[in-house]
Image (cartoon, helix red, strand yellow):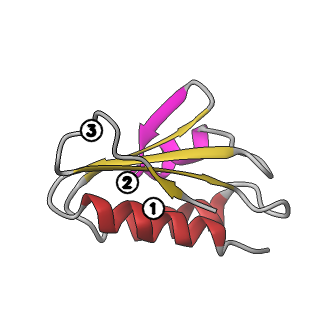
């Protein structure tokens, strides 16, 4: 379940943590779906897995995270639609299935 956290973030920023489902790795198809969703938003969006943080609108960068089943992803965004972007992406990750 994603949870929003607005501690020490600018007013136009949002953050959420969400885990990949137990049956999904962030490989080509799920990563492409994730990036297509991220590209719908104007905000700058990043995704973090472990110590690596990448641009959520870059397919190669998202694939390079190597996120596997159950990996905790931290989604962060800043910009005019940041809260909606993070909420939508968290829901998309939670709904992934193979």
Look at the numbered disc 1 and give the secondary structure of its residue: helix
Whether residue 45 sits left or right of residue 19 in the image: it is left
Look at the numbered disc 2 and give the secondary structure of its residue: loop
Whether residue 16 sits left or right of residue 50 in the image: it is left
* Label whose residue precedes the other's in the sequence (1 or 2): 1
**Mark 1 neighbour class, 10 Å CA radius: few under 14, some 14 to 19, many 20 or more:** many
* Label whose residue precedes the other's in the sequence (3 or 2): 3
Q: Which mark is residue 9?
A: 3
Look at the numbered disc 3 and give the secondary structure of its residue: loop
In the rendered image, residue 57, in percent from the top left (x then y), is placed at: 37, 54
The answer to whether one can see residue 36 in this image is no
Q: Nearer the viewer, mark 3 or mark 2?
A: 3
In the rendered image, residue 15, in percent from the top left (x then y), is placed at: 40, 48
In the rendered image, residue 24, in percent from the top left (x then y), is placed at: 78, 62
User: Dot 1 corresponds to which residue?
Assistant: 35
**Labels 1 and 2 touching (C-beta < 8 A):** yes
Q: Distance of mark 3 from mark 2, alpha carbons? A: 21 Å
Please report the bounds of the magenta region as a residue range.
52-64
User: Dot 2 corresponds to which residue?
Assistant: 57
**Mark 3 neighbour class, 10 Å CA radius: few under 14, some 14 to 19, many 20 or more:** few
Q: Distance of mark 3 from mark 1, alpha carbons? A: 23 Å
Q: Which mark is residue 19?
A: none
Residue at 47% x, 33% y: name it: 53
| Residue 47 is inside the magenta segment | no
């Amino acid at each position: 379940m994603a949870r929003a956290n607005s501690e020490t973030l600018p007013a136009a920023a949002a953050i959420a943590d969400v885990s990949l489902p137990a049956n999904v790795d962030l490989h080509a198809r799920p990563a492409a779906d994730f990036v297509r969703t991220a590209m719908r938003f104007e905000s700058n969006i990043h995704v973090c897995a472990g110590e690596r943080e990448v641009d959520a609108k870059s397919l190669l960068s998202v694939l390079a995270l190597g996120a596997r089943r159950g990996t905790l992803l931290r989604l962060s965004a800043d910009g005019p639609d940041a809260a909606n972007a993070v909420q939508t992406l968290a829901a998309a990750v939670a709904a992934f299935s193979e």
